[in-house]
Image: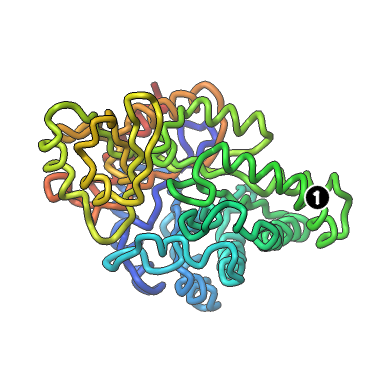
Amino acid sequence: MDVLERELQLTYCTNIHPANGWPAVLAGLQQHVLDLKQRVAPDQAFGIGLRLSGQESHELLQPTALAAFQAWLAEHNLYVFTLNGFPYHPFHQQPVKDQVHAPDWREPERVAYTLRLIEILAALLPKGMHGSISTSPLSYKPWFADLASVPWALLNRHVLHVVAALVLLERERDIFIQLAFEPEPDGLLETSSELISYFEQLLAVGATELAAMLNCSLHEAQTAIRRHVGACLDTCHCAVAYEAPRTVITNYQAAGMSIAKVQLSSALQVQLGADRQAVATALAPFSEAIYLHQVIQRNRDGSLLHYRDLPQALAAIDDPQACEWRIHFHVPIFTSSFGVLNATQSALRESLQFLNEQPYSQHLEIETYTWDVLPSQLKLALTESIAREYAWVLHELKA
């Protein structure tokens, strides 16, 4: 939906709906989206942030499936402007953990999957609107012994293959889509500074390879990288890494890197004082078997300590040096606290306040995908919960 006539597109990510296979994805959209549109934007066109697995991208590209989906969107005044191209495999009701990164950007199937998503978004995107596809932070850092063992040239080649496809799409069909890398705790690109470093080396090293692919000048290749490669700013991930949103945004801008999409989300945050048993008890229901919930601990001396998942952190909760944990668990954005636990809502609010001052991105996507695994006391009816998140965001954007 167009927000406050400001050329901001606001949606939510459909990875919230458990589904396996395109028919199940479509059934989830039919069950929830029309009711949500009636609550949030009954008289407006309503945007969808579509998430498709590798299998679902194959299934939707069948001509009858894509044509039927286009007709359904048109019938109900719906449109798709952004895709979540990070998780490739089924994303609910079975362990995901570090396999959320598989296949990573070393694998040809990651390239093929992303190209299928580009083809789908090109078919669905409203005329004159630009699109975005968020993707993984290249790989999962613990899969490598050290950064020297990362096959950067192979990663670059695969990324540039996608960039070349995006350049040709715009040149031949006048459709502009950006690939947005999403830094994540323990991702190969974990922070905004790591993404900026990768972007700069892609410009310095990869542009020559792209120029050969496109038979263009080095300057034209660098311009293409700047235009088609951007950041996906996930405000949960940013907060877990103790990154200040304004600093992250201005650093991206200083590097000449666009913020193709902002994923609006909050992480868990806890202060570790004297009563740590109460904190451990409160966190126990969040320690679940589906997703990774990385923890970054701030020590009294200001240093940071990383845990790959919440159970490892809970085992070390009595560490006397620890004073704060930030936990990669996407919690409802309309809530700032859960008893002794807090959310990083203030970081999300800061991101939106900065957006009120300057339009650093046009694509906003609410991404609380953990409703299925939230503790029971935080669960409400799904459509009602998403509508509350929309209301909270719209209130902040009017502030």
Give the image location of residue 352, x and y in percent.
44, 29
Res 76 quadrant in image: bottom left
Q: Is residue 362 visible?
A: yes
Q: In the picture shown, does residue 98 fall above or below 24?
A: above
Q: Which residue shows up at 61% across the image and 47% down it?
A: 129
Q: Is residue 27 left or right of residue 64?
A: left
How busy is the neighbourhood of tag 1: few (under 14 within 10 Å), some, or many (20 plus)? Answer: many
Quarter in which the N terminus is drawn: top left
Which color scheme does this rendered protein use?
rainbow
Q: In the picture shown, does residue 100 fall above or below 346?
A: below
SS for dot 1: helix
Q: 307 or 14, which is in the foreground?
A: 307
Give the image location of residue 80, x and y in percent.
50, 55
Q: Is residue 341 left or right of residue 58?
A: left
- The residue wearing badge 1 is 221
Give the image location of residue 171, x and y in percent.
78, 56
Give the image location of residue 333, x and y in percent.
30, 37
Q: Is residue 81 visible?
A: no
